[in-house]
Amino acid sequence: MKDIKNDFPVLINRNIAYLDSGATSQKPYSVINAVKEYYERYNANPHRGAYSLSIEATEKYEEVRDKIAKFINAKHREEIIFSKNATESLNLIAYSYGLENLKQDDEIVLSIMEHHSNLVPWQKVSKITRCKLNYMYINENFELSDEEIEKKITDKTKIVAITHVSNVLGTVNDVKKIIKLAHKKGAVVVVDASQSIPHIKIDVQDLDADFLVFSRT
């Protein structure tokens, strides 16, 4: 059987088990070589030049959009939006859609297990718009019970922001069930898939999330 450590140059000749991928993932040769190839052969400003190298860089850039759309089964390639990382994407949603659509007495529902990137922006939005934050709490098994979900997502709920997999607990939330309930209440759902995207096959059409955010792995 192939030793997967041999795919990661930083782990070769190191007698360690790297367990901090939730914070920073090590890069395999395939990723390092792809980045190296881009900088050696295609590096230019995409979408900003009419010269041949810029056109090639744009083509490579847009190829990634197509690959991601296929990877998560997005219906349209235009649904894929690039940002620096998942934190920036969550901030973008909160400070554009959130500030534009929330008002006093509306409610945002979060789970208590959210990463700060999916918590702090909504705290700031609630302070600005004077809407209310409601937290879904976990049970003794570190899970969100059906009763808790149904109790917190109400007719006043306008946004539900939920992690697919907790970066601390490893809890896998039934986001499809949460999305279905939220939509029945007329709420929009933001799914943080940063921890799940490398491990769980995600079909955004099947999930029916309004926003799904993840960073490159």
Image: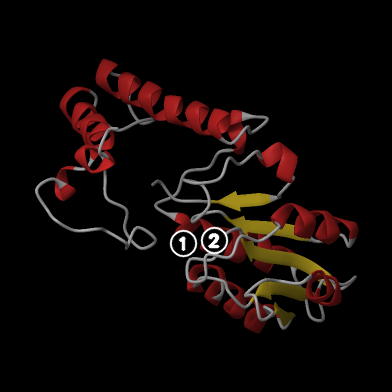
Can you tell which quarter of the image residue 24 is in? bottom left
Q: Residue furthest top?
A: 52
What sort of colour scheme is used for the picture? secondary structure
Query: Where in the figure is residue 123, as x and y percent of width and height?
Result: 60, 79
Instruction: Please tell me how many numbered marks the rendered image carries.
Output: 2
Mark 1 surroundings within 10 Å by alpha-carbon count, few (fewer than 14), some (14 through 19), many (20 or more): some
Disc 1, disc 2: CB below 8 Å? yes
Asked if one can make out residue 50 in the rendered structure from this viewpoint, the answer is no
Q: Amino acid at mark 1?
A: Thr
**Circle 1 residue:** 87
Q: Amino acid at mark 2?
A: Leu
* Label placed on residue 206: none
Mark 2 surroundings within 10 Å by alpha-carbon count, few (fewer than 14), some (14 through 19), many (20 or more): many
Secondary structure of the residue carrying tag 1 is helix
Residue in the foreground of this view, choosing between 42 and 187: 187
Relative horizontal placement of residue 191, taking residue 3 as reference (left or right): right
Question: Which quadrant: the N terminus?
Answer: top left
**Circle 2 residue:** 90
Query: Where in the figure is residue 178, as x and y percent of width and height?
Result: 77, 60
Instruction: Give the vertical position of 125 relative to 13 (above or below).
Output: below
The residue lying at 9 percent from left, 48 percent from top is 13
Q: Residue furthest front?
A: 1
Residue in the foreground of this view, choosing between 51 and 56: 56
Instruction: Give the vertical position of 186 relative to 147 (above or below).
Output: above
The residue lying at 53 percent from left, 52 percent from top is 196
Instruction: Give the vertical position of 71 relative to 141 (above or below).
Output: above
